């Protein structure tokens, strides 16, 4: 009985590990056909006759971006939406540029673990476990830090100079949920009585936060 239980446990753990990242590819390549109307877990494949080297190339993270928002950071993704050739390959990158004192606010990636390499500058980074423990460290140029899949994490440039990092993910489209934006700018809106009770503040404070986080109208 015990042997059968441990065999089942091992099988379940193996399945869980297998499903912890994008599924393995079943062919050489499957360049994303984003114009297709087909809905599936990923993108359908282009005809091989229509594939070119442009499907596997992207220069959007070669240089730093212009940071001009209130939090002082800019994320430039290099995922399947920018590089169709990443479809089914289970990897992607992002570049994050920080102004002095800039913050990449607390957020999660529901579909990927993130490993970050500091290109320049110095940042305070960290994540919070499900036991509510903060794991944090100051990382400098050339150093690496890992953020486990699904856990809330942040990066903060506390210096007086710009900073930049390159992050890698084990998903072609890791997804990002910024905690503040998700809670306060959802459509339809979360009920105020949910937010006031969760944060133990009044309705005026909630409405003030919502107004500050609302997308700016052009």
Image (cartoon, grey):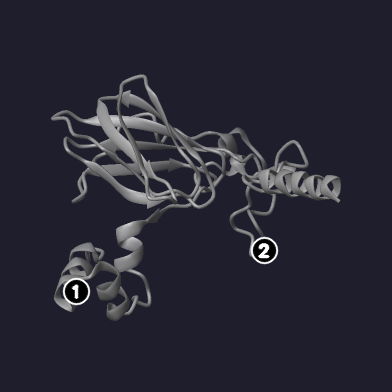
Residue at x 70% of width, y 44% of height: 18
Task: Looking at the image, tell me whether mark 2 or mark 1 is earlier in sequence order.
Answer: 2
Q: In which quarter of the image is residue 42?
A: bottom right
| Image coordinates for residue 87, horizontal then vertical, percent | 63, 45
Going 54% across and 41% down the picture, which residue do you hit?
83
Q: How many marks?
A: 2
- Judging depth in this view, the residue of 202 and 30 nearest the camera is 202
Please give the residue where the numbered disc 2 appears in the rendered image: 38
94 left or right, relative to 112 = left
Q: Residue at x 57, y 43 (%)?
A: 171
- In this rendering, is residue 114 above or below 191? above
Instruction: Give how far across and how far down residue 125 sits, in percent.
Output: 31, 36
Q: Name the residue under label 1.
A: 207
Kind of element beneath mark 1:
helix
- In the displayed structure, 192 sits above or below 155; it is below
Q: Residue furthest top?
A: 142
Dot 2 lies on which element? loop
Viewer-nearest residue: 211 or 153: 153
Between the residue at mark 2 and the residue at mark 1, the CA separation in whole angstroms equals 40 Å
Quarter of the rendering occupied by the C terminus = bottom left
At label 1, counting other C-alpha atoms closer than 10 Å, the crowd grade (few under 14, some 14-19, many 20 or more) is few
Query: Residue 192, which numbered label?
Result: none
Q: Position of residue 131 (x, y in %)?
A: 42, 50
- The front one of 64 and 158 is 158
Is 159 situated left or right of 31 in this image?
left
Left or right: where 26 falls relative to 186: right
Q: Position of residue 210 (x, y in %)?
A: 22, 69
Q: Which residue lies furthest to the front in this view?
A: 2
Cβ–Cβ under 8 Å for marks 2 and 1:
no
For image coordinates 27% across by 34% down, the residue present is 124
């Amino acid at each position: 009985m015990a042997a059968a239980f441990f065999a089942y446990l091992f099988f379940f753990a193996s399945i869980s590990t297998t499903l912890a990242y994008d599924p393995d590819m079943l062919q050489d390549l499957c360049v994303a056909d984003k114009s297709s109307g087909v809905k599936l877990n990923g993108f359908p494949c282009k005809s091989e006759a229509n594939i070119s080297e442009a499907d596997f190339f992207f220069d959007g993270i070669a240089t730093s971006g212009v940071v001009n928002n209130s939090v002082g950071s800019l994320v430039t993704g290099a995922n399947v939406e920018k590089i169709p050739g990443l479809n089914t390959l289970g990897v992607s990158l992002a570049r994050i540029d920080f102004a002095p004192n800039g913050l990449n606010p607390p957020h999660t990636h529901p579909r990927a673990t993130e490993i970050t390499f500091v290109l320049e500058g110095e940042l305070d980074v960290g994540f919070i476990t499900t036991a509510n423990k903060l794991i944090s460290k100051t990382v400098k140029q050339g150093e690496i830090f890992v953020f486990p899949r699904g856990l809330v994490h942040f990066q903060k440039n506390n210096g007086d100079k710009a900073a930049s990092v390159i992050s890698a993910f084990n998903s072609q489209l890791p997804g990002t949920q910024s905690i503040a934006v998700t809670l306060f700018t959802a459509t339809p809106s979360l009920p105020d009585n949910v937010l006031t009770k969760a944060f133990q503040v009044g309705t005026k404070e909630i409405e003030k936060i919502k107004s500050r986080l609302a997308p700016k109208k052009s």
